[in-house]
Structure formats: structure tokens, C-alpha cells
Amino acid sequence: MLEQRVIELSKTKLAIISIGGSVLMTCVGMAVIGVGISRNAIWMLCVGAIAMLLFSFFGAFGVWKFFDNKPGIVINMQGFTDNSSGVSAGFVPWSDVTTLSEWSSSGQTHLAIFVDNPEKYANSGNVMQRTAKQANLNLIGTPILLSANTLKISQSELEALFRAYFDAAKAASFALAKD
């Protein structure tokens, strides 16, 4: 039987991705606003303002997550608890998981966790989290995507770890059902 495994958040990755990217994109938003003012283009003002607000929010989230001492992912024979991103799934029992699949977009690789009742997970969290999870569900077929971007583990190690626990949990469940 596999022991519980805790994967911590990487403060370095969080600082670079969340805070660095947010500062850069907020500056881009400010530049777009500047160009919009000089050209008297309302649409550019709107795009710039939306970019500034959105990426300022991401930056604030990055700062909040930087000081979050909860582990990014806890995985055991019962399931896993995801606290790795702004749209974390929370606790997901292996009995809900049907398939694990790799999903890539824009050079980013994610582990897609398909579940029996995706709406249960898509409808959890605040309004922004629910919106993002619903978009994932509509685009990919699952609201649960895991990435090693903010974790102290590589994507390939994360996927191998999840496959090992998923396979072990399914085998244990099958053995119990046979008895």
C-alpha cells in the first residue's frame, strides 16, 4: 500500500509565474490605455482597463498563495486534496475518478482528472473559480486540471505519481469488490 505523499507549493515558481507575470501584464494594460488615450480609442481603453484589473487580481492571488502554508497537493489511497491553484478542486476521492489524461494547450501541459460527476466540482468555489471550472468542463470535459507550475515537482513526476495512486486505489477497490 502506498503511503500518503505531500507535494508542497514552490514559492520560487509562484513568485516568478504569478507575481512576475501579473506585473508584466498589468504594465502592458497600462501601455494599451496610454495608446488608447493618445488615439482616442475607447476600445483600447476598455481592453487596457480589463487587462490591468484581471492581472492585478492574479498578482494579488499570487501574493496570497505565496503566504499560503497549506501543501499544494496531498495524495493517498483515499484520493487527493488539490490546493495548487486558484481553481483548486479540494478533496477528490479516487472513487469519483474515471480517467487520467494529459492535456496540453499553449505549451502548458496539465493532468486532466475526469470524474463521474463533473458538475459537483465545477460548481464549487467562488464565482471566478466556478466560471473557470465551467470553462474547463466545456472545453476539456472536466473541471479538474493539475499542473506542476506552482509545485515542487515536475509535470512528469506528478503524472506518474497520480497514475500510481489511481491504479493502486482502483486495484484495491476491485479486490474489495471481489470479496
Image: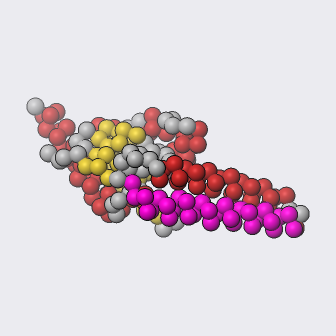
Toward the viewer: 67 or 178?
A: 67
Q: Residue at x 23, y 45 (%)?
A: 4
Taking the view exactly as shown, the residue that stands out farthest to the right is 40
Q: Residue at x 29, y 41 (%)?
A: 79
Report if residue 22 lies within the magenta region.
yes
**The magenta stretch spans which residues?**
9-38
The percent coordinates of residue 11 (x first, y second) are 43, 58
Is residue 62 left or right of 82 when viewed as pictured?
right
**Looking at the image, can residue 67 be seen?**
yes
Q: Is residue 112 visible?
A: no
Q: Is residue 57 magenta?
A: no
Q: Is residue 166 above or below residue 158?
A: above
Q: Residue at x 36, y 48 (%)?
A: 71
Figure coloring: secondary structure
In the image, 63 versus 177, the foreground residue is 63
Picture quarter containing residue 130?
top right
Magenta span: predominant SS is helix
Identify which residue is drawn at 78% across, 55% down. Answer: 46
Res. 157 image quadrant: bottom left
Image: 7 above or below 81: below
Of all residues, the one furthest to the left in this rendering is 179
Where in the figure is residue 164, as x and y percent of width and height?
23, 53
How many numbered discs sit on the rendered protein?
Answer: 0
Residue 86 location (% of width, % of height): 50, 48
Task: Give residue 120's position: percent from left, percent from top.
Answer: 45, 34
User: Quadrant where the N terminus lies?
Assistant: top left
Q: Quadrant of the C terminus?
A: top left
